[in-house]
Image: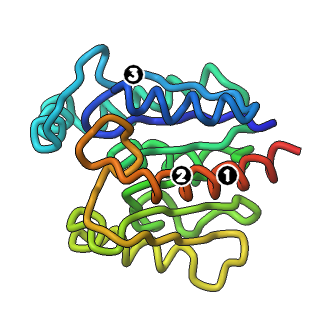
Amino acid sequence: MAEVLLFHHSLGLTEGVGAFADTLRRSGHTVHVPDLYEGRTFTDLEAGVGHAREIGFDTLLARGERAAAELPAEIVYAGLSLGVVPAQKLAQTRAGALGALLLGACVPVAEFGAAWPQGVPAQVHGMDADPYFVDEGDLASARALVAGAPDRRLFLYPGTAHLFTERGAPSFVPEAAALCLERVTCLLDAVGR
């Protein structure tokens, strides 16, 4: 089975993030979920993003890199929204990456290097009318990432919710979350062999 380093979204290490990780664990995968906010959680996206800005994105990236340094290089990097930033950076820059799971966000590949590393499969998941994902350029970045690459896929779900996999939150969309988890598990099963 695969080993996964999962980075939380701007609300912090919430129960919903824990539930997502536990679902993957029940499928037999090992999932590590570092707390980049050091115990802080939020119920409002804007407040969570404000906290991230206060900490500084460089600090969050450094915390993500420290978490990765304690784990094997052969790992799948996963991120939920804000957590996509450290996940994508590590998938692109740390040798040995087995894959990337980017949920609710995607950064332009050029942000972390000249090209996506060969042989590193990726999935990007987002809602087709999520203003954060669509209007802020993430969808365009995702389309560029997967263009012409059979091992990289973009999955769009109908709706406007940003944190659609966040069980227990008003934004939770059970059908989309279930399909997303099924697709994520397929990638993990494939690289974990």
Disc 1 versus disc 3: distance between alpha carbons?
21 Å
**Which residue, given by chain and number where applicable, does mark 1 sit on?**
99
Mark 2 belongs to which amino acid?
Ala
Mark 3 belongs to which amino acid?
Asp
**Which residue, given by chain and number where applicable, does mark 2 sit on?**
178
Q: Quadrant of the C terminus?
A: top right
In x, y percent, where is residue 155?
Answer: 52, 70
Residue at x 29% of width, y 56% of height: 162
In x, y percent, where is residue 112?
Answer: 46, 57
Picture quadrant where residue 119 is located: bottom right
Answer with mark 1 or mark 2, whichever residue precedes in sequence: 1
In the displayed orientation, state which residue is furthest to the right: 193
In the displayed structure image, the side of residue 160 where residue 71 appears, left or right: right
Is residue 69 something one can see in this rendering? Answer: yes
**Which residue, given by chain and number where applicable, does mark 3 sit on?**
35
Label 2: how many residues lie within 10 Å, few (<14), some (14-19) or many (20+)?
few
